[in-house]
Amino acid sequence: MGKLGDKLGHIIIPLATPFEDGSQDVNYDAAAKLADHVISEGKCDSLIVGGTSGEFNAMSFDERVELFRVVQDAVAGRVPLVAGTCSDSTREVARLAQEGEKLGFDAVMALGPCYCKPTQEGGYLHFAEVAKSTKLPVMLYNIPIFMGFNLEKETLGRLANDFDNIVAIKDEAGINPTQMSDFNHVTPDDFTIYNGDDIMVLCGLAQGAAGVVSGGSIIIGKLMRKMIDAFLAGDVVGARKIHMDLDPLFKAFGSNNRLNPIPLWKAAINLCGLEVGPPRLPLAPATDEEISIMRSHLERLGIV
């Protein structure tokens, strides 16, 4: 099957899902324009559609499949596409994976089960069903802060060795930032690891990650690429300088004890002149004060 990281590249952007003010209907035209923007500006190497950053949890099955179609048409083969198949329901993940395969997506990303706090065996069985439902390459998504459990290296090792199409993981296990090194020891040589946290890109690259799934790159994708290129070229000092410039912005997405960064992230995207609207309830939109904080960071970086 080949190494998925070679196909998806260093920077994968999880697209925000634009919603209309007031009605909160999906703004499909704005989604197409956003996809075109990040590709035309060279901010990404590939895209994830309808993932956690895309607020999948607040969308219906039909809305998500239509979003797949709209973004695929807008991208027109310019970059690889990953179908975000995240759901609390294993059956729905499998159905979404099958829809992505029918549409010709390049891979699927599957989140571990949320809310139910499964055992490691439950997590294994969930991902196993996804792998069996599609012929596409499968990227697992491990984010313990929302799943309620951490996918342990032994479980990942079983999955990667039992299923030929489980070939990658997006790891956002902030509880254990060295976990990526452990993952390398239990997976095949052609297995791909992506960092899922903008703050930890350099840490991830140092541990063998292929790159990052970066929501922030909708805003600062050119700086993200410059940082990654510098690190890979051996300019660690230069990469660190860019990281230190970007770090306050990334941390500000979680201001005021917001566990979910989407409201402030979307506020920052809107300030850049990209139409994504508000988050969909139950997430509350950014306050005027929070928007002001976002603007100050973007002005400091010369983005607006």
Image: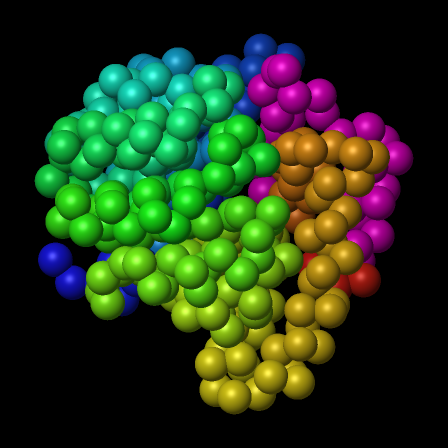
Would residue 270 be seen by someone viewing this image from the given angle? no
What colouring method underlies this structural image? rainbow
Residue at (65, 21) in percent of width and height: 283
**Quadrant hosting residue 301:** bottom right
Residue at (23, 50) in percent of width and height: 160
Residue at (79, 40) in percent of width and height: 255
Position of 93 with respect to 221 (left or right) is left
Q: Residue furthest right?
A: 289
Q: Is residue 228 above or below residue 154?
A: below
Residue at (54, 81) in percent of width and height: 230
Position of 1 with respect to 204 (left or right) is left
291 falls in the magenta region = yes
Q: Quadrant of the N terminus?
A: bottom left
Q: Quadrant of the C terminus?
A: bottom right
Stretch of the chain drawn in magenta = 274-299
Q: Is residue 242 above or below residue 171?
A: below
Residue 259 percent location from the top left of the image = 69, 33
Q: Residue furthest top?
A: 23
247 falls in the magenta region = no
Nearest the viewer among 149 and 280 is 149
Would residue 260 be seen by someone viewing this image from the given angle? yes
Nearest the viewer among 203 and 296 is 203
Nearest the viewer among 100 and 92 is 92
Q: Is residue 82 above or below residue 92?
A: below
Residue 207 percent location from the top left of the image = 47, 69
Residue 172 percent location from the top left of the image = 52, 47
